[in-house]
Amino acid sequence: MEKIAFADGEKIGVIDENGVTFYESEAVARYREYAETRKRNDEWKVSGEGAIFRGDGEKNSVERVDAYINGVAWQDGKVVYAYTVNASSGVCRRPLDPKAREEHIFSSSDREILSVHTFGPSIAVTVRGDDVTSQVGILDGRTSELATFTDGDARDANAVFDAVHPSVLLFDSAGAGRLSNGDFSGKYAPAVIMRLDRDGLQLEEVRGDGKNSYVKPQTNGDGTLYCIKRPEREKKNSILIDIVLFPFRLLKALFGLLQAFTLIFGKTSLTSDMGGGDNPTSGRKQDARKLFVDGRLIDAEREEKRNKKRKDRAYGFIPASWKLVKLGEREEVLAHGVCDYCIGREGIYYTDGRHIYKLSGGKESKLADTACCLSLSVETDLAADFDF
């Protein structure tokens, strides 16, 4: 059985013949320990009579730690993973031996690593330096040197090595929409698949149609290209449903208007005394039902309810319109509701956010259930036929 590594929130999971084993990120654990130590060291500031007199005793000194595993890959039998914890990001290499310490490869407080893909000692990465654009590049797993290859007003992401031509990087690119004053519009153009030949420094578009986004390209051993195809706009409800829901939407709009009025003039919330949600003006907390998946904001709770209506198998919170496709003269749809996948020698593995499946010989089998899996990788040795 091939080994599968996957990210499940802030933990790293590995599937093998023994089942599922979870590993802790030492980088995240160290940050949590540091935050806890700093909290204990600062307790004197919010305790005692002096602090109470100044009003400091009412302050909450607990630091919130937001941690995520952004991507996983395999290298020399170890799991390479990219992580983000609060305002820092990095790449580490995690041995499967629980007694062995993980290796630090790269860290940064001004650049975030969003994806990893390995070929020999090299790691293809997505690097984000601001809230709008990102670049693709290669991180040397031995020297920790990072080199980026794209630069422009676009979201370049999900860089992988071509399985047949290792000098080629495949990635997806979506141009950033701009307003007349130059500000980001909040939207991107439909993503297209790009091919970058590092030897000849040639860049070309491989697939795109202006209506759908083609993301996360990968090739297998014979050069066949796969990707995830998702519509730029989801299908809307029928006119009949819109008519039925109109009174409820009108009431919701009126309630929102009253809520805004009371917040502005009364400095209170209509729901503050009724166990309602967070104050919408605080801007500190994001609706837990919504999350960003590969740059796209989705309503996880709503999508999961929709997917439960599909009776052929269990679905996660990824929209069913996100399809894993095999590209050629025609596009062959292999699975629905896919947010990430990887190609092994025994089959194709993919996740819908809640489950991990294996597709082989036209048959689908579930390998594991997860809480929130957005990235996975199969242990292969595609670099075995190449000399470095």
Image (cartoon, rainbow, N blue to C red):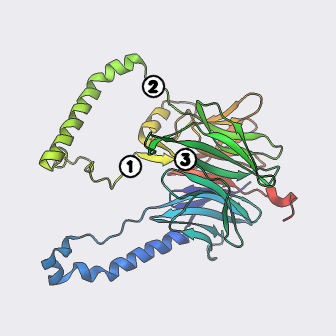
Q: Nearer the viewer, mark 3 or mark 1?
A: 3
Label 3 and label 1: CA atoms lie apart by: 17 Å
Upstream in sequence: badge 3 or badge 1? 1
Identify the residue at the far top of this view.
240
Which quadrant of the figure contains the C terminus? bottom right
- Packing grade of label 3 (10 A; few <14, some 14-19, many >=20) is some
- Packing grade of label 1 (10 A; few <14, some 14-19, many >=20) is few
User: Which residue was labeled with disc 2?
Assistant: 236
On the image, the x and y values in percent for residue 88 come to 49, 67
Identify the residue at the far front of this view.
181
On the image, the x and y values in percent for residue 291 come to 45, 47
User: Which residue was labeled with disc 3?
Assistant: 294
Label 3 and label 2: CA atoms lie apart by: 22 Å
Identify the residue shown where x is 55% and y is 47%. Answer: 294
Residue 61 sits in which quadrant? Answer: bottom left
Residue 260 sits in which quadrant? Answer: top left
Asked whether residue 15 appears in the rendered view, the answer is no
Instruction: Inspect the image, locate mark 3, and give the three-letter code of the amino acid beneath it.
Output: Asp
Instruction: Inspect the image, locate mark 2, and give the three-letter code of the amino acid beneath it.
Output: Lys
- Under circle 1, the secondary element is loop
In the picture, measured across the screen, residue 145 lies left or right of residue 109, that is: right
Q: Observer-nearest residue: 53 or 200?
A: 200
Which quadrant of the figure contains the N terminus? bottom right
Upstream in sequence: badge 2 or badge 1? 2
- Under circle 3, the secondary element is loop
User: Which residue was labeled with disc 1?
Assistant: 288
Q: Are marks 3 and 2 in contact (CB under 8 Å)?
A: no
Instruction: Inspect the image, locate mark 1, and give the three-letter code of the amino acid beneath it.
Output: Ala
- Under circle 2, the secondary element is loop
On the image, the x and y values in percent for residue 199 come to 81, 55
